[in-house]
Each structure stands twice: as C-alpha cells, then as structure tokens.
Image: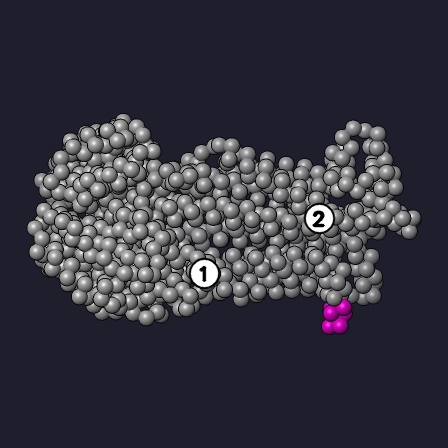
C-alpha cells in the first residue's frame, strides 16, 4: 500500500507540476505573511513592555517642566496608594540638523539617569535593541532616535544643534549612533529623546542656570515615573486621576501618560503594518483554496477512469480518498513549513526597513501565537482538501464523456465564423458552456477588487500630504498655530502672518490635562466651539457644557445629556455632555469645552493658549514658519497642521498601495496560470478545429483572454458593491483602536474606477500570457485524435 501511495502521488505530481508548484508557492506566501503579521504584533508589544519595565517607566509617567521637579515628585509620592516614584532629570531644548528645524522640543538625557542603560540600536548586527551595547556617548557626541533618520535624513557623523539660550548660545554635538528609546522612539511620537555625555549635560545645565528665565530657550525638567503600591487596588487610570486632581503636577506637566497609552502610540506603525500583512495573508489563503479546488476538480475529471479502475481492483473509497489527498496535503504542509522558516528572515528584513519609523527592533522570531494561528489555518485547509475529494467516495453512475463538450464547442465555433464580434462571442459562449471552471477566477476577482478598493479608500482618506488624517487628529481645521512663550506681541504676530499669507480665519485653543468622571484625558478648550467636528448633539457653547469623543464616551459610560464631573488642578466642576465630536488626539481619549467653561476653574492658566490660523495662501506657510522662527526664536512656538510621524505614515501608505498591487498581480497570475492550464488542456481538440477552420492563434488567444476579462468584470462589480457597503464600517472598526470613529472615506475616480479596472487588466493580461500554448497547437492534432 505504501508503494501504491508513492506511485499515485508521483503520478499526480508529474502530470500536474504547475498546479502543485502553485499550491506550494501560495501556501508559502500565505504562511509567511500570516506568521510575520501575527508575530510582529505580539513580539513588538511583549518586547516593548519588557523594555519599558527595564528602564523603569512605571505605571504612569509625568513629563514636567521647571526646576521644582523634586518637590513635584515628593508631592506625588505622598498620595495614597502610590508606591515607587522615580525622578529622571532631563532638559527640554529645540534642535536643528541639516535643513531640519524642530517645532517640538527634544529631551536630553544622560546614560546615568537610569539604573539600566539605554541600548545602541544596530540592525546590521542582527541583535535586537535590548541586546545591544549600552549607549554611552563620548564628550561632544550624542545618540539619537532612528526616527530622525527618516524625518530629517541625519546619519552618523552629522551635527545636531540644540538651542540653549538667546544670544547665540547653542550646543552642537556630533551624532555617534542611534539608540532604542521605548518611550519616545517611534516616528508617531512628536517629542524625541537624545542621550548626551554627562559632562555635556552638566555644561548645558549650567548655562541654563546662569541665564535669566526670560532669555532661556532650553528648560530643565524631568520624567516622574510613578508606580502604584503593590497592596493598593489602584489602576493606572486611578493613579493619573489622583495626580491630576490632588497635586500641582498639571500646572507644570507637558503631558501625562500611562504605560499602556505610550505603548499604543509606540506600536501604532507595527500594528498598522501587522494588520495589512494579516489582511494580505487572508486573501492569499482564499486564493490558495481556490487554486487547490481547481486542481482537485481538474484531477477528478481527467483521472476519472483511472480511479474507477482502482476501485475495481478492490481499493476502498476511503483509502482512495486518502491516497488522492496525500499530494495536495503534502504541498500545503511543505509550503507552510517553508513559510514558517523563511518568516525569520522576512521579519528581520521588514523590521530593518521599518526601524526608522518604529524605533524598536524586537527579536525576529515566530511567536507561539503566530505559529498556533498558522496551525489552525493549515488544519482548515487540509479539511477543505478532504472535503473536496469526498466525491471519490460517491458512486459514478455514468462514464466520463470527454468528447461531448468538445463537439459542442466545435459546433459553436463553426457557427460563429460568419458573425461580427467573433472573439467576444466565442468568449461568452465558452464561459456560459463551462461556468464551473470560472467560479474560482470570479471569487479571486471579487476578493482582489475589494482589497484594492479598501486600500485605495484608505490612501484617498489619508490624502497626498496626510491632510485627511490630520483633519481627524486636529480639534479644528487650521493651517498654522503659534504659542507665545516669551515677551511677544500677538498683534505683531497677527500682522506678520496676515502680510505674508493672509488670515482667512483664526481661533484660540488650549490643551490642558483634566479628568472626567475620574478618567484622565486631554481637554481641547476652544474659544469658538462651532469649529469642532461634531458627529452628534450640539457644540459646547454654554459655560456648563462639554463634548466628548465616541471613544471617551464609551470608556466613561456617558451619553448626550448626562452630567459629568470634571477635575483640574485641585478643582472640580459639573458639566453636561452636549454632544459627541471627532478628534483622534491621544488615541481618541479627549474632550472639548468652550473657553467660558474652562474659566470656571480657578487655576486656569493664561500660558496654555495657542492661536490657530486658517491661511488664505497655504503655499506660503512653509516660508512663513521659517520667518517666524527666525524673527522670534524661542519666544514663539510655531507649528503647522502636522506632526513628525505624518511623513512616515504617508510614505508607508504609499508603499502599502504599491505592495498591494504587486501582491494582487502575483495572486492573479498564479490563479490564471492554473485555470488556463486546465482549460487549454481540456480544449486542445477544439483549438485544433478552430485553427483548421482558419482562425489565427492571435484571435484564439484574444478570445481566451476575453473570457477572463468578462469573468473579472462580473467579479469587480460584485466586489465594488461589497466594498462600498463594507469599507467604511470595517475601516471604522479597524481605526477605532486609534481613536478614530465614524470614518467616512471619499468616493473619487481613484477609489471607484482604478481598483476594478486594475483587477480586470491584471486578469486579462495574465490570461493572455498563460495562453501561449494555444499558439503551439497544430491542426494535425485533430487528425491524430480522430
């Protein structure tokens, strides 16, 4: 029996090498993408959380500015339920490198600020960040985040300059390398960290101390890492609530984040990348099943008489089914094993390319979760093979007549010789006469059209420069924002902005940290609440009204009309939720109120306000930003409607679109190759007849490709309808984890027409390339088969 199994398997593989190669290739690609997607997501989170614990992030970290950081740490430590409190000194300073000037201060740290060192990030060595050598810069050098290499193009040996004080007091340091920063290393993080030599740090610190406060451009500060006591039933959110409501930290805070929130920001790029890899693997799995189904159907049809002989020789139907399934199951297993092995190299390559955006380099090893998911998918695919082969266990009441379809096809071809649109007519009749052979191609067209439409809609929503994404992150639409830091006249700034770019509209905005129902969040305080992106209810125009995001409303269990308690800097006030609005800042963890409502708190600060402009001439914005920075220096903080990670995200979106189309082309070609091989093999006699009647090979190939064009046309119509119905709900669910709710993607020619046209073109072109065998069929074959 073992020898029979070997001979039967060898016979099937030898007769259909293309089919089995396609199955191995597709299962390899599917398993590779699946293991990479699942492993990158789980490995990155596990690795990041481990590194954050190693460096002592705590349950909550408060970034504070000023010289009284020790007093703030003592104040936090005195709160009930608080365990360890660790102060990590730092210096906030603006920086510039090459042609890049930051609009957000960086934080300067020293190697001695942590018990465990930061690690040098060396992707070329193959070591993960946590295994690298300690980041210990020599005097006059600095280690920077790898995200700066993608944002401003810096490399080892370049000079980065930090603004310390007015009067040209700057600190220029040479980049010695890149380090792994689990707190701020991602390009999604606006602020960046720098590791400097201890003596350089002390020198900068001395210059700051000697400089009057009005002339300082760099400021001392600290990260206050806070952990709850082991015996305290205090969640990180409860810990933040105590800090915000019962201490003076909010008056000095740059921001306050829990470990989970920072991890979500840091892992944003990994999660997006892993999500797309997983989506690609699902499509690959579906296409692989289609190919397997085609191969099994073709084998059952062509070897029907051989199977009947084996049954006559006494082989049971169950044993025959098992023998038949063996090569198909073997091809799937081999492909999945190869994909699992190659996933290590693939993850190393992907993480190496993405490290400039992700900022961390986890071990490139398949995770148990990824392998477990692959095992489940493989088991389902093996069950599918067994199910498709169950026809072998059914009795065959009639013999297979291979000539019936051929004769019908020959008559149809002869009848069409004198008609117009011969190529198209032959294609239609061929599809209608053998619909079952094109079901797999139809399903592939539906899936590919849907996936291309989804990716196209996301790309169109993000926008060419990321403006669509920023509309969801911004509280209100604007082009430029300024915040007074020193002695600057806002009227003077208004005049310069109006002269250079024209002011169409303007409004004031502040973003203090508050609590709502004991839940820490960012409050967007705006003097014109009607500018908010409302999705339900009304803007908070009254002094006792506020609005929340759908994300925050779900967390605190609030609805429109509910009363909530808001805390800020030791005070508490009652507000009514007047509506739901859209803003993805802080992963959607934010609320908004009017300036009148904020004024109810006795400790509301004047310095929190920032003025935002809508410009008449947006093209002049970049020049205006440079002029404002040169004119006012550190007295004025200037920013546009963007953030440092936007360029990386837009680039990643463009790359995903390109990869998606390349991926679709590979899947379509493999599917067409197998289907075309099956059809050409079954129609050799018909092709010979048509050539004998005078039809050129070119016209026969065109008719053959036209069949796939017709099938793909039906598929893209179905796929387009499904995409239009499911795109926004599915994408809203996907981006809901990032605080984006109610996402509405635009309908444009690029999203409505390009994906289906690309699918039709790819299928038709692949069918044309796979039909080359038609040109090699000789009319004499008709005589030999007769």
Main SS of the magenta part reads helix
- Which image quadrant for residue 378? bottom right
Residue 744 x %, y %: 42, 35
Q: Is residue 519 visible?
A: no
Q: Residue at x 57, y 53 (%)?
A: 285
- Pick the front one: 245 or 784: 784
Who comes first in sequence, dot 1 or dot 2?
1
- In percent of width and height, residue 58 lies at 24, 61
Which numbered circle lies on residue 770? Answer: 2
The local secondary structure at tag 2 comes to helix
The answer to whether residue 765 is left or right of residue 494 is right
Q: Nearer the viewer, residue 218 or 223?
A: 218
**Which residue is at a point 41% across and 38% down the rendered structure image?**
463
Bounds of the magenta span?
1-7
The residue positioned farthest toward the front in the image shown: 168
Which percent across, then down, holds residue 129? 35, 65
Of the residues tagged 1 and 2, which is closer to the observer? 2
Residue for badge 1 = 39
Is disc 1 placed on a helix, strand or loop? helix
Residue 640 sits above or below residue 98 on the image: above
38, 233: nearer the viewer: 38
Residue 669 in view in this figure: yes
Residue 4 part of the magenta segment: yes
């Amino acid at each position: 029996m073992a020898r029979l199994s070997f001979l039967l398997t060898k016979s099937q593989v030898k007769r259909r090498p293309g089919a089995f190669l396609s199955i191995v290739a597709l299962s390899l690609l599917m398993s590779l993408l699946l293991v990479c997607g699942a492993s990158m997501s789980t490995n990155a989170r596990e690795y990041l959380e481990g590194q954050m614990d190693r460096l002592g992030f705590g349950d909550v970290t408060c970034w504070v500015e000023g010289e009284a950081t020790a007093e703030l740490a003592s104040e936090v430590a005195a709160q009930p339920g608080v365990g360890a409190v660790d102060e990590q000194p730092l210096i906030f300073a603006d920086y510039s490198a090459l042609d890049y000037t930051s609009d957000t201060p960086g934080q300067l740290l020293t190697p001695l600020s942590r018990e465990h060192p930061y690690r040098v990030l060396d992707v070329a060595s193959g070591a993960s960040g946590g295994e690298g050598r300690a980041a210990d810069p020599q005097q006059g050098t600095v280690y920077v985040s790898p995200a700066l290499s993608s944002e401003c193009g810096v490399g080892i040996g370049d000079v980065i300059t930090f603004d310390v004080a007015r009067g040209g007091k700057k600190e220029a340091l040479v980049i010695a390398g890149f380090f792994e920063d689990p707190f701020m290393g991602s390009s999604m993080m606006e602020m960046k960290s720098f590791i400097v030599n201890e003596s350089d740090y002390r020198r900068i610190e001395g210059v700051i101390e000697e400089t009057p406060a009005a002339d300082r451009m760099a400021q001392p500060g600290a990260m206050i890492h806070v952990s709850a006591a082991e015996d305290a039933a205090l969640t990180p959110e409860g810990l933040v609530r105590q800090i915000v409501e019962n201490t003076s930290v909010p008056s000095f805070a740059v921001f306050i984040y829990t470990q989970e929130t920072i991890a979500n920001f840091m892992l944003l790029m990994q999660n997006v990348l892993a999500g797309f890899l997983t989506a690609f693997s699902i499509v690959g799995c579906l296409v692989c099943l289609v190919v397997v189904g085609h191969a099994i159907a073709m084998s059952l049809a062509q070897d029907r008489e051989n199977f009947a002989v084996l049954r006559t020789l006494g082989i049971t139907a169950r044993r025959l089914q098992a023998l038949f399934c063996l090569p198909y199951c073997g091809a799937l297993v081999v492909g999945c094993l190869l994909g699992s092995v190659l996933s290590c190299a693939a993850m190393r390559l992907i993480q190496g390319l993405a490290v400039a955006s992700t900022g961390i380099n986890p071990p490139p090893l398949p995770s148990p979760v990824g392998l477990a998911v692959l095992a489940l998918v493989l088991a389902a695919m093996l069950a599918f093979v067994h199910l498709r082969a169950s026809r072998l266990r059914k009795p065959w009441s009639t013999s297979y007549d291979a000539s019936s379809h051929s004769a019908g096809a020959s008559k149809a071809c002869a009848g069409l010789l004198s008609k117009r649109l011969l190529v198209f007519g032959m294609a239609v009749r061929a599809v209608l006469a053998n619909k079952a052979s094109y079901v797999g191609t139809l399903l592939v067209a539906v899936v590919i059209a849907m996936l291309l439409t989804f990716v196209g809609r996301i790309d169109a929503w993000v926008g060419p420069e990321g403006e669509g994404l920023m509309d969801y992150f911004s509280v209100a639409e604007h082009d430029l924002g300024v915040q007074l830091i020193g002695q600057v006249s806002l009227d003077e700034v208004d005049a310069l902005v109006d002269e250079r770019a024209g002011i169409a509209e303007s409004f004031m905005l502040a973003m203090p940290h508050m609590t709502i129902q004991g839940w820490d969040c960012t409050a967007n305080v705006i003097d014109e609440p009607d500018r908010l992106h409302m999705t339900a209810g009304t803007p908070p125009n009254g002094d006792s009204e506020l609005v929340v995001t759908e994300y925050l409303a779900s967390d605190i269990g609030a609805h429109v009309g509910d009363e909530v308690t808001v805390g800020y800097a030791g005070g508490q006030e009652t507000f009514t939720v007047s509506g739901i609005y859209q803003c993805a800042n802080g992963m959607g963890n934010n609320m908004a109120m009017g300036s009148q409502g904020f004024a109810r708190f006795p400790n509301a600060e004047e310095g929190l306000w920032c003025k935002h402009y809508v410009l008449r001439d947006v093209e002049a914005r970049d020049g205006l930003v440079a002029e404002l920075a040169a004119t006012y220096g550190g007295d004025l903080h200037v920013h546009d409607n963007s953030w440092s990670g936007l360029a990386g995200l837009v680039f990643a979106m463009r790359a995903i679109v390109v990869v998606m189309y390349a991926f679709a082309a590979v899947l379509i070609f493999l599917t067409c190759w197998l289907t075309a091989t099956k059809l050409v093999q079954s129609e050799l006699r018909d092709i010979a007849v048509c050539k004998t009647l005078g039809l050129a090979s070119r016209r026969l190939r065109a008719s053959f490709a036209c069949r796939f064009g017709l099938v793909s046309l039906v598929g893209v119509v179905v796929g387009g309808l499904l995409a239009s119905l499911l795109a926004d709900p599915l994408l809203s669910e996907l981006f809901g984890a990032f605080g984006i709710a109610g996402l509405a993607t635009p309908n444009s020619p690029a999203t409505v027409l390009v994906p289906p046209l690309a699918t039709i073109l790819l299928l038709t072109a692949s069918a044309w390339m796979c039909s080359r065998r038609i040109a090699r069929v000789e009319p004499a074959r008709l005589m030999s088969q007769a």
